[in-house]
Amino acid sequence: MPKRPRLLLDLSTSLAWRGKHAVGIVRTEREIATRLLDDPALCVIPVVYHDHAFRALELEFARSLIALVPASAEVPLPKPKSRIRSGAQPIHRKVANAIMQPLARLITAIARELIKSVPIRSREEVRQSLLHARQALRQFSSRRAPVLHSPETQNLGIVIYPQATDVLFLCGLGWDVIDWRHLSSLRLTSGLRIISVLYDLIPIKFPEFLGAPGDYYYNYFIHIIDNCEKVFCISKRTEADLKEFISNNGRSPVSTEVIYLGANLPAKPDPTEIIDLKVRERLARGRFALAVGTVEIRKNHSLLIDLWDELLADPSFDLDLVIVGMPGWCADDVIARLEGLRGFGSRVLWFKQMSDAGLSWLYEQCHISLFPSLYEGLGLPVIEALQHGRPVIASNRGAIPEAGLGLATILDPDDRAGWRAAVIAASRAPRQVVNVGPERFPNWERTVATIKRGIRDVMLTDTVA
Amino acid sequence: MTKILQLTTYPTRYPRHGGQLRAHHTARVLEESGYILDRMPVFSQSLYPRGGEDPAVDLDQARTKRRFRDTWQVMDLTTCELAAVDNTCFQKFADRIQASDADILMLEEPWLWPAVWRWRDSLSAPPPVVYNAYDIEYRAKAAMLVEAKVSGADDICADVEALERDLTQCAAGSSATTAEDAATMQAWTENRVVVARNGTILRKVEHLHHILPVPLEPCQKFLLFVGSGHPPNFTGFWNMVIPALSTLRAGERIVVAGSVSQLIESRIEKDGPLCMARDRLILLGQVNDLTLECLLCNAAGILLPITYGGGSNLKTAEALISGLPIVGTTHAFRGFEEYKSLSAVTIEDDPTAFAVGIRRAFNSKASPRAIHLQKQLLWESTLQPIVDLVSTIAS
């Protein structure tokens, strides 16, 4: 038996998203893994879940997966796509979007119908097969060889047969990249302990925000409760939601602890990826409101679209709206409304992707940051904006007030008049600075220090006989 | 500070095979002893497409001009000669040496000596040369050429011997990997010849328990053979280990890592299906460091079956430091004779007795080597005579 407990650090999400712009949970896995991987106090083995087994990775390969900026020329990063969605969009892109987006939606719909149409006993196998197919397609579309067949990953051939002293740490897209049925069996047969990070229970609380079948996520959360020794929740709200879910489903309690995700963007502010100089100069004046987050129903961009549709009619209202975020699921109507908004491309700008440096610059320049989301596991953009010294108007739903740290203006997203008044007041007020010391904000070092303590606690507990 | 220009015939930054490892660690140990090392790899880029570094002089363009083009066994001799014979290559070679402005030239293996000789010949006070010999090459080549039934082997070997003699004679000092090789070289020169046997690094592998490359499983016990495509590795394995496959029990396997796997596989395919091999032999091919470490952690023992070839076997040092039971030949322990009496070491030179040794290894347990034995096997210790030699020459 090994002398020391081993930490199996799962990087399946980072493998699936290798070389791509990382936001949200993908980004979180990279940030946490970077700080765990080389810790000499923990015996860390980087792993990925692939083909019904956890595979050990060489350290160098693991580092290349979690590198925020890939160091090797062999790992091409997609070119920054911080183009403005406006009439100036190149014609080939318009044509590609016009074809690809409906095609992607059609394929998704067919896949879901296909899953529904197969007998329940085979449904999970079909779903797993489709996930593999999607991964291959993503790699193909980004003009790279399928990641699982690239030279760097030839050595996914080292299988870990877990021991009772092993601890598996998961902080990625666990429902997407891991077969929990199999992981559950592995745990029962080996005594492996599992620690996971839980971001939210939105699919259970608000299934209407997602297009995916509810039982899929329900199944995942049940697996988390039944199999994990410890669950780190990213806010008190998420912890409370988890406890409520446990209670509603008659499960045994699981050990939980709250960790706040680090909000420190690791790049110096830099606007150079905003190619259009006129746009850059306009933004540099600082007369814009910034909304960061995937464009989807839950983020409630509708409220901002409504407000700007109304406010732009007033010639004296000079605050532009800048949205940063990728198109999310079931957001066709929101996107159509956004693109049809008067002033879209001039007074209302949409950056689908933005590097840390570019985002940091936008935070610094903005007059105010807006976050009208209908529910969040945390609401990281609120903390990021505050950390840049910018005032924030944010929703009172989910964990967003926690993210506001008592510094943000909190409003009910249903209170349209309240939001209108607050935005107008902010636009008329001189530029304000939220002046708070850095110790007030969560950072990755503190987050990972808490995680390490939790891991050690689990390692020190008696193993299952 | 003394600057040493190290001339190699392969890239050494990311070493894989034995020669690369010795050159890599020689440079490292000298650096750690306070010398400035300038690495000058001269090779054909196409032979090391994933070498991780560019050659100082690329011999690819000139390769078609080499002698004995069908005799791959002497490719190192005939390719490196081009650095002296081909004027374009030589000019690049000379420019690079000149630019280094080194105090000492260190030749790893003898193959670049013709080019170095030509460059030195033009100087009134050339820097001294240290020759780091890995083998008595003409003997090794003779064995390989005879085995491959190459015509004209005697002439080729005579060329190699002349090259080695001349270099040893001209070098300010030389090193050999065994006392026997050193005695041969000492007969060629009045200058000092030291013995610096091959060494190894200490790998931390304990945490890799039950982490195994496919298709191995934890329920299987296996003995490990690690080898490059160097002919003695194949011949030794084929003659000593293949006959023993029939003695393996259910769940017992022989695992081969390294490019010798391809030679074994080709031979098995050529000679027809070999069910024993299919069921009991696992050929992994070249493996990365993590895979090798997983194998070392989980193996029941290590095989060292080579029956000919010169120099001291680098794999022997790796096997000894692992603490695993070893089944080896007398030849594999050249340069490591004092370890033959260790309790976990079985030496057998007859295939039948070797098979018995394999059974014994499967039934033995690993025991960590004593600290002082481990230290003796590290490159820092085995290469110290070279550091002392260079120190003397530098002063």
Image (tube, coloured by chain):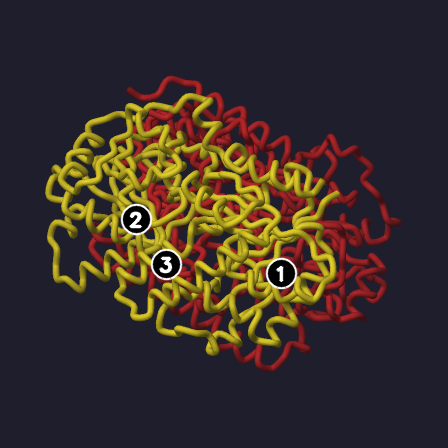
CA separation in Å, label 2 and label 1: 63 Å
Q: Residue at x 27, y 46 (%)?
A: B307
Depth check: give the residue in front, A381 or B380. Answer: B380
CA separation in Å, label 3 and label 2: 11 Å
Mark 2 = which residue? Answer: B308
Could you tell whether A295 is left or right of B213 in the image? right
The colour applied to the residues of chain B in this rendering is yellow
Mark 3 = which residue? Answer: B141
The subunit letter for the residue under badge 3 reads B
Q: Residue at x 40, y 46 (%)?
A: B311
Could you tell whether A455 is left or right of A463 in the image? right
Depth check: give the residue in front, B53 or B90. Answer: B90
Mark 1 = which residue? Answer: A353
The colour applied to the residues of chain A in this rendering is red
Depth check: give the residue in front, A63 or A274. Answer: A63
Kindly identify the amino acid type of the residue bearing the numbered disc 1. Answer: Gln
Query: Measured from the top left, where is residue B88 in percent x and y?
Result: 62, 76
Query: Measured from the top left, where is residue B84 in percent x and y?
Result: 57, 70
Residue A283, picture quadrant = bottom right
**Quadrant holding the C terminus of chain A:** top left
